[in-house]
Image (cartoon, rainbow, N blue to C red):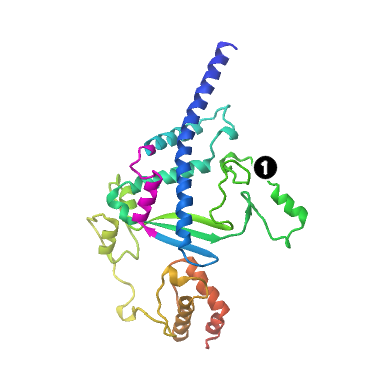
Amino acid sequence: MDGIEKETANMTIENRTQDLKCITTLAQLLDDVVKWFRDSTSKLLEKSGKNVEKRSRTVDHGYLEVSLKRFHLLPDNNRYEKAQSALSALSSNYEEERADRTPKNKISSAALVCVEKWLYFVGYFKDEQKRSMYKMNVTSEKVFQMNQRRSFRMEASHFDQTQTAELENIDDSQFTDVDELWISSAPGRPHNNGPVNPGFRTSISFWCMGPELSFTDAFASCRSVILASGTLCPIETLKTELGVKFHSQMEGDQVIPMEQIFASVLPVGPSGHKLCATFRNLGDGNSEFISELALVIRSISMAVPKGILCFFPSYRMLAMVYEYMERASILRQISFGRW
């Protein structure tokens, strides 16, 4: 081995050693995150109700803080400084093309994004005065069963034995795009922990209930911030929520004459059931709230000529109401203009 080859070999060993240290640091962090995830989801889902298709529960910042502390994941832990440095080093190194770095010795981009998102949350949760703004939601939804990463395993009646075998034999080696290569969760792999709830997609979401936190951080270095919209009023409420002082403001006149504006709150529907659009009351498409809301829409549609425009807080509620109105023939009744 001549001098150049020896120098190249030493550099390769040094690079691999440095990468290994960074990966080990992130792996140790993610190992505790996975343990925390499994512990939190299993405990919270036990008390989330009996819904077969979907179970969900939301807890406040106090529960979140205590659970993170049990697994040494609170933001004040010095491990995050090491993890941030390791992530930055790996991200920087992976931008460089090296002959010794193959897909087998390179951590996937999906794993890096996972660490990045976790550190992003920790950075906000670090401020103790702002922690009360956070809530944690655990949701487990039934999904089509997937074989390994990308292939749906259909019922036996839809496929013959040959087709099913082909789906089961799909391996990660068939996917050559390094950027899209996720760590496989196929059975038998050393790193496989198994699903929290077999047959369901289980997730944890961190909800920041105060827009002030992200808004002030996003525009901290800006000289000027201009907000323009037709729905910013009442402006005083907006100022409080964003936590920013607006030194100049302008408001246009309402284009619709006041005598043509009517606003009202409906506490109950035509059948006497209360209208309260909480997550618990939504339930499924057959809940009393959905049926009562559909009746309200029918009543208004029959009284107001030339159609109405309805706004929903989510696409999920829109779909549930529409499907119910379709099943109950309410859409047909509205179309023909009769009950």
Q: Nearer the viewer, residue 1 or 63?
A: 63
Q: Is there any visible trace of residue 312 in the rendered image?
A: no
Q: Nearer the viewer, residue 25 or 249?
A: 25
Q: Which residue is mark 1?
A: 174
68 part of magenta stretch: yes
Q: Is residue 20 left or right of residue 237?
A: right
Q: Is residue 138 left or right of residue 144?
A: left
Q: Looking at numbered disc 1 in the image, what kind of residue is underneath it?
A: Gln
Question: In the displayed structure, would residue 124 be above or below residue 268?
Answer: above
Residue in the picture at 75% in, 54% down: 163
36 part of magenta stretch: no
Residue in the picture at 45% in, 66% down: 314
Residue 298: x %, y % from top left: 48, 82
Residue in the picture at 57% in, 32% down: 105
Question: In the displayed structure, would residue 149 be above or below residue 334?
Answer: above
Mark 1 neighbour density, 10 Å: few (under 14) some (14–19) many (20 or more): few
Quadrant hosting residue 266: bottom left
Q: Which residues are magenta?
A: 59-79
Q: Residue furthest left?
A: 247
Q: Nearer the viewer, residue 335 or 102?
A: 102
Question: In the displayed structure, would residue 244 be above or below residue 330?
Answer: above
Residue 191: x %, y % from top left: 56, 42
Label 1's element?
helix
Q: Nearer the viewer, residue 198 or 202?
A: 198
Which quarter shows the N terminus? top right
Q: Residue furthest top?
A: 2
